[in-house]
Image (tube, grey):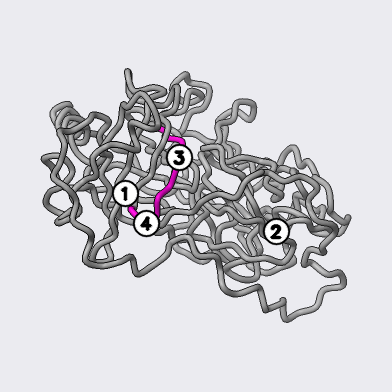
Amino acid sequence: MKKTLSLFALVFVLVFVVSCGGGKSDDTDPTDPTEPTTEPTTEPTTEPTTEPTTEPTTEPTTEPTTEPTTEPTTEPTDEPIEIHEIIGRYSDAWGGSHVISATAWFQPSEWGDTLFHITKVDTENDFIIAHNDDELAFAGYEGKWSRFDYVIKEEKIYYCQIASQEETEEAALSATTADRTDPATSGCGTYPWTELIEVVEEGIDKDDEKIAAWATGYENYTVGEGVKDEWKTPEKALGKAVGDSYDVVVLGDGGSIVLTFAKPITDGEGADFAVFENSFNDGFLELGTVEVSSDGENFVAFDHYYLGVEKIGETGSHDASLIWGFAGKFKQGVGTMFDLAELAGKPEVTEGAVKLDAITHVKIVDVIGDGSQLDSIGDPIYDPYPTTGSAGFDLDAVAVINELL
């Protein structure tokens, strides 16, 4: 969805955010904290509790489900990652966006992205220490140290960036704790704490009336490893999504395909297109990254965030709430939607190489799920691995929601 903001509103938001929870400046020392009266009741980082238990009810001549081979030979992380309680994707009352993983706190914005690399977590005293990125930071804050205090109170999550430009990690650790007595109204310096509101993503059903068209052609089908010949039929990705386990083209580990359309996709209201995979349940999800082009040569990729920390294994399940910006988040018959407006600040768009009002090509690239690939904020990506036969992303269809008339 396209967004506009008056100059006055922009100045007001920036001044206010800099002063409170989402800001980057140090406040005067707040009063000593009072411990929260309630403890967190939910853990947003819990792993899925069920394994895929259902198989397709109709038996094809060949088995579409992937088959295990051997365990990955590389370990993407050398040390265990300490988990905090607020991993997830959030918005806030000031229009801000937050992607918080075990290792990073990312705040994408049309006014400039900010990234903080998490170095220490204290889940007893509820704070996070982070190193400001050397590039993605406000001018003058690059390479400094920040401290984020957080509290979960009355089933709401609040944070206060009590320090933002300390010279050392030790100085950030020593920053005065924010006052937790009443985070909704005060305690972050002279301002309230900032509430983090969990973002919930919905898919689109293949029969939804908002769908205007489907892909009509394909280019550059590049098959990755682990795919039998019976799954190498790219024409199966054309037309309407079927929503079963068999009418798909399989990309294989690291494979890709480009879909084309009778009329270009345009940046309209809300999501503009959707990608359909063939997972038979809500947890066994094979992921792909998505790129778009207006000329078939210059592509720009959607940001994608994987907030899980555990390897999935060949038959394991995802917690889908930890997956953002990937195709394949939903089970068969339900598409993952993409909004072209999210690409508006990308250099490929601002410099004119990709025109969001006339997208002619959509590219899907399989993610190799062993953790060797990193997401947009540097975290390893996992999906079911290792697999073979129909390994990797299984593309059913690409739907057009906003079509250029």
Q: Which of marks 1 and 2 is nearer the N terminus?
A: 1
Image quarter where the C terminus lies is: top left
Q: What residue type is labelled 2?
A: Pro
Q: Could you tell me residue 119's position as x and y percent? A: 47, 39
Q: Which numbered mark, 2 or 4, is in the foreground of this view?
A: 4
Question: Disc 3 to disc 2, how far (Cα)?
Answer: 27 Å
Question: Disc 1 to disc 3, how far (Cα)?
Answer: 19 Å
Query: In the displayed image of the protein, which residue is found farthest to the bottom?
Result: 57
Local secondary structure at mark 3: strand
Q: Say which residue label 1 marks.
A: 91
- The vertical placement of 41 against 402, above or below, is below
The answer to whether mark 1 and mark 2 are in CB contact below 8 A is no
Q: Which numbered mark, 3 or 2, is in the foreground of this view?
A: 3
Residue 384, disc: 2
Which residue is found at the position 35% from the left and 57% from the top?
198
Q: Which of 239 and 201 is in front in this view?
A: 201
Q: Which amino acid does label 1 sit on?
A: Ser
